[in-house]
Image (cartoon, grey):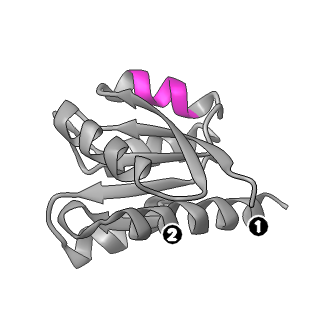
Amino acid sequence: MKESSLRVLLVDDDEDDYVLTRDLLSEVKGTTYETMWVSRCTEALEVICKDAYDVCLIDYRLGEETGIELLRKAMAAGCRMPMILLTGQGDREIDIEATRAGAADYLVKGEIGPQILERAIRYAIAHGRTIQT
């Protein structure tokens, strides 16, 4: 079976979380993930809107701004890259708010393993393609 390759943008103000996410993705069989890390919202919005990545993983806590605020700005700017919100703790209200803001999924960092992350990315990309056609 041919190995596929995906470009993933991670927006997180914590480099340790970037490393953990990158390492999780490296454990996925059958897909190679090229990950880019952005730590600031202003830079992230520019990169997201260039649509050079297959999917974007956005942390909920981004310093003075939240991932949901970044999602809203990206959607308002016409960015259509599939985006998944990551958070340190589960919260149904944030989950619902993220989905309403345009997130394809909502994942709790402590509950994510390689298979769960791979599945969420795969589903988000497939859902994004469905919406665009």
User: In this view of the protein, which residue sits in the foreground, 81 or 100?
Assistant: 81
**What kind of residue is marked 1?**
Thr
Q: Position of residue 27 (x, y in %)?
A: 40, 54
Residue 20 seen by the camera: yes
Q: Is 3 left or right of 114, judged from the image as shown?
A: right
Q: Which numbered disc covers residue 119?
A: 2
Relative to 128, residue 76 above or below: above
Furthest residue toward front: 1
Secondary structure of the residue carrying numbered label 1: helix
Amino acid type for the residue under numbered disc 2: Arg
Q: Earlier in the sequence, mark 1 or mark 2?
A: 2
The reply to whether discs 1 and 2 touch (Cβ–Cβ < 8 Å) is no
Quarter the C terminus occupies:
bottom right
For label 1, count other residues whose C-alpha is less than 10 Å away and answer few (under 14), some (14-19) or many (20+).
few
- Region in magenta: 43-48
Q: Is residue 123 left or right of residue 106?
A: right
Q: Position of residue 111 (x, y in %)?
A: 23, 70
- Residue 24: percent from left, percent from top: 34, 52
Q: Which residue is mark 1?
A: 130
